[in-house]
Image: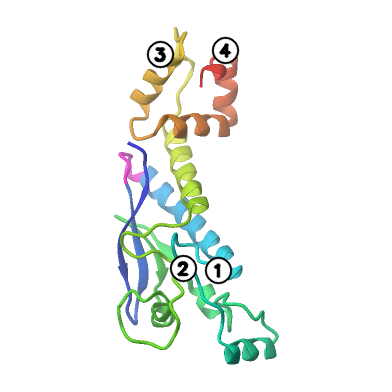
Amino acid sequence: MTIKLKTLEAVGSESATYSEFELDANVSESVKTKIQQDVGEFIVEQVLQTIGNAKSPVSGESWGRLSKDYKSKKVGEGLPGEADMENTGALKDALTFKTGDTLKVGFFNSEAWKADGHLKFSGADGTAPRRRFLPDEGQKFISSIQSGIDKIVADNILESDAIDAEDLDGIESKAELYATLKDRYPDLSRAQIRLAITRNPRLTNLFEDLDLLDLL
């Protein structure tokens, strides 16, 4: 099974507007918390970076241009004349995440209702144009963000249950190597395992010392 980030629910209200995610991984609570923390930080960083370029970080979503009047207003205030969600900066500053049984990314203060005005999670009528920068249920992030999430999950799993020389003793073929690795990390695909190992200097050196690196 390849681990993916699944959007369980999207909530929009005056007090909290967020996307709720579940990471499908059979790991300990401490590892789960570490993964949620790292993924939450990454999502917030990537969302802010993407919308700063006036683009949506949600797959399949696109943003229209600013109205002529609002563009003139922004430019007059010394701001870029683009749909970058930047006015006072309060909305961007409020984007955060919470960890627990699931990972929630969104707004948990007075900016929540403003955020829903663009995200349209609640279904409430509003005059703000839809600019979805967090995914609704069934939606996902663009591939570059999804790929980054996959890397974070795989790296944390390998780091939490690191393989050593004794585990790899006697392996002579690619089939034997991947049988051992898949038994150790059943939730990760071959590609995730291979890339996570090559991103980890300690594991890369270990596999090189054992003449197994070329078998990955």
CB atoms of marks 4 and 2 within 8 Å = no
Q: Would you call the spot at circle 3 few (<14 residues within 10 Å), some (14-19), or many (20 or more)?
A: few
Work out whether mark 2 precedes mark 3 in sequence or the reverse, and give the earlier one.
2
Measure how far apart labels 4 and 3 are at the Cα level: 14 Å
Work out whether mark 1 precedes mark 2 in sequence or the reverse, and give the earlier one.
1
CB atoms of marks 1 and 2 within 8 Å = yes
Q: From what the image shows, is residue 84 above or below residue 185?
A: below
Q: Would you call the spot at circle 1 few (<14 residues within 10 Å), some (14-19), or many (20 or more)?
A: many
Q: Nearer the viewer, mark 1 or mark 4?
A: 1
- For residue 15, which quarter of the picture? bottom left
Measure how far apart labels 3 and 1 are at the Cα level: 45 Å
The residue that mark 2 highlights is 133
The residue that mark 1 highlights is 51
Q: Amino acid at mark 4?
A: Asp
Work out whether mark 1 precedes mark 4 in sequence or the reverse, and give the earlier one.
1
Of residue 181 and residue 1, the one placed in the foreground of this image is 1
Q: Amino acid at mark 3?
A: Glu
- Residue at (32%, 67%) from the top-left corner? 10
Q: Nearer the viewer, mark 4 or mark 2?
A: 2
Q: Tell whether 171 sits left or right of 65.
A: left
Image x and y of residue 89, in percent: 57, 79
Measure how far apart labels 1 and 2 are at the Cα level: 7 Å
Q: Which residues are magenta?
A: 24-30
The residue that mark 3 highlights is 176
Q: Tell whether 204 sits left or right of 151.
A: right
The residue that mark 4 highlights is 211
Q: Amino acid at mark 1?
A: Ile
